[in-house]
Amino acid sequence: MAIFPQSGTVKKDSPAFGTDAPPPAPARETPPPAVADFQTAPSQASTAAAPAAAPTPAPRAAAPASKESIIAADLTIEGKIEGSGDVRIAGRFKGDVNVQGNLTIEHGAKLNGGVRAQQVLVSGELEGNIESASLVELRDSAVLTGDLKAGLLTVASGSKIRGHIECGWGDVKPTPAGNAKDKAANDKSSD
């Protein structure tokens, strides 16, 4: 039983067998029935020469996607986070967070440690200092116990803050740890 049309077939011993030459076109005006095609696909050069071929869109460069790391609600982790992506904490984390992206602390989550990030969005609890951020948003369920330095600060009704706040003074530059005495001396000398 043959699944190929009998007329115009190429035999195995024929020199045309295994080449990329297209099969001969049928002489009928109606399209032939569907037949299994075991030939290789034509190259792009041959499809570009075909006048009826639809143009293929040029490949676009993928936009850099911001990556987000998530600490799930049922996790408790102790350590240090550093990186260039965004971080979302839904569980508990004890340690410092230093990211070039955004930090989000979800409702019910708790972070014990210092924070440096582009934007810090707090719906949960933060015990530690926000040492550097361009924007800090404390949502209605936020609890912040620690000092805060930010370019912009948004505080929602119902949030709680206990600590020293510095915001709106232009570029926020982090102070190196251990230089609290030097900073205090500089503050007194500038008065």
Image: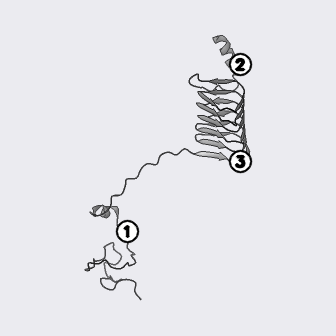
> Disc 2 or 1, which lies upstream in sequence?
1
Left or right side of 18 for 188: right
Left or right side of 42 for 87: right
Kindly identify which residue carries mark 1.
41
**Residue 155 higher or lower than 88, as above or below:** above
Whole-angstrom CA distance, mark 3 to mark 2, is: 39 Å
Element carrying mark 1? loop
* Few, some or many residues within 10 Å of mark 3 (<14, 14–19, 20+): some
State the image coordinates of residue 36 (x, y, percent, origin top left): 40, 78
Kindly identify which residue carries mark 3.
73
The total number of labels drawn is 3
State the image coordinates of residue 117 (x, y, percent, origin top left): 61, 34
Amino acid type, mark 1:
Ala
Q: What residue lies at 67% left-to-right and 19% top-to-bottom? A: 183
Kindly identify which residue carries mark 2.
181
Seen from the viewer's position, the closer of residues 127 and 187 is 127
Whole-angstrom CA distance, mark 2 to mark 1, is: 74 Å
* Few, some or many residues within 10 Å of mark 2 (<14, 14–19, 20+): few
